[in-house]
Image: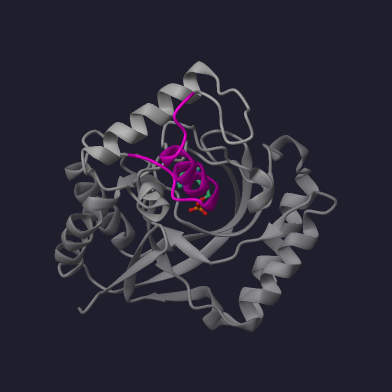
Amino acid sequence: MLSGLVSYSDSDDDKSEESNDCHISNNSDERGVKRSHSQEVNLETKKVKQSAGILPIPDTIKSLFADKSQPYQDDPEKHGGRIRSFAHEEGSWATHVHIPYAYDSRFENLVQELLLCLRPLDFKPIDNFHISLSRTVSLRHHWIKSLTDSLQAKARMLHKCYCEMVGVKLYTNDEKNRTFVAVEVQSHPDVLRDYILAVDSCLEEFGLQKYYKDPSFHLSVGWCVGDVLPDVLEEQRRQLQAVLDRHLHTDSDLKLIPVDQIQCKAGNKSFTFTLDT
Ligand code: AMP
């Protein structure tokens, strides 16, 4: 990996060892401690490199070339027990396209009540409410600019719309290691499908996986570890729908979600595309 570069540590320990090198003429140190054959060879190599006038590389630079062959160890504890959908890969960023939802306290109250219906199942609220327009895909870092340029160009041709909350639905991810409770949404006419076609065509350019063939648009409100679909009772499903109906009846404008932008998150970067028409 460091071909053509000389690698050695500039730590204090090694500096003192090197200064020893200068006045050691046999294979013992000043204290008379015998060095092993490999230690001898290392010392010789250093001397040869120094005499050849090759400059040492500081640790700070070496760390940039740190050994990447060690597989990344994911720790689900660090993200609430969630398990990654795909292995973490150096230089690749988890990327997702969605419609952000600017919620208010009325929606938060609805979410709380929905999660209560599912007890004793351990559903936690979602951090960022959104309507997904893509799966989470793994994007090479140097492709982020091209992908977002492409999304920007497509977004110019998409229209704003309103989505309507229509029901409560449960989903599992493809790996079936997470379950989601969500408010299903629809647009009239089916503008959300146009968004998917646009996003899919951008992802396809980069060989990335497209969205579901039969997309079911939704705002996830809570998630739980594992596939708990069989554990949700029929009575709980009825309650979930009744809670949504009651909230929408009391607050009829809660039902409509204005859509005027699309967002793409790639790692910690976020790109917003405004829909003008
Ligand atoms: P989201 O909150 O958008 O991440 O969606 C929650 C989960 O729903 C995702 O992990 C999807 O894999 C899953 N899902 C299952 N079936 C569908 C579908 N037909 N359309 C959209 N999402 C789905």
Q: Is residue 112 above or below residue 147?
A: below
Q: Provide residue 181's location: percent of width, then percent of height.
A: 63, 53
Q: Say which residue appears at 76% left-offset and 58% top-offset.
A: 239
Q: Quadrant of residue 172?
A: top right
Q: What residue appears at the point 29 percent right and 40 percent down from the top-left corner? A: 50
**Whether residue 81 is visible:** no
Magenta stretch contains residue 13: yes
* Range of magenta residues: 7-26
Q: Nearer the viewer, residue 254 or 125?
A: 125
Quarter of the figure with residue 22: top left
Question: In the rendered view, would you say 30 is above or below 267?
Answer: above
Residue 98, percent from left and from top: 39, 61
Is residue 67 visible in the rendered image? The answer is yes
Q: How is the image coloured?
A: one colour
Q: Does residue 269 appear to the left or right of 110 in the view shown? A: left
Residue 122's place in the image compared with 152, above or below, is: above
x and y percentages locating residue 28 in the rendered image: 55, 26
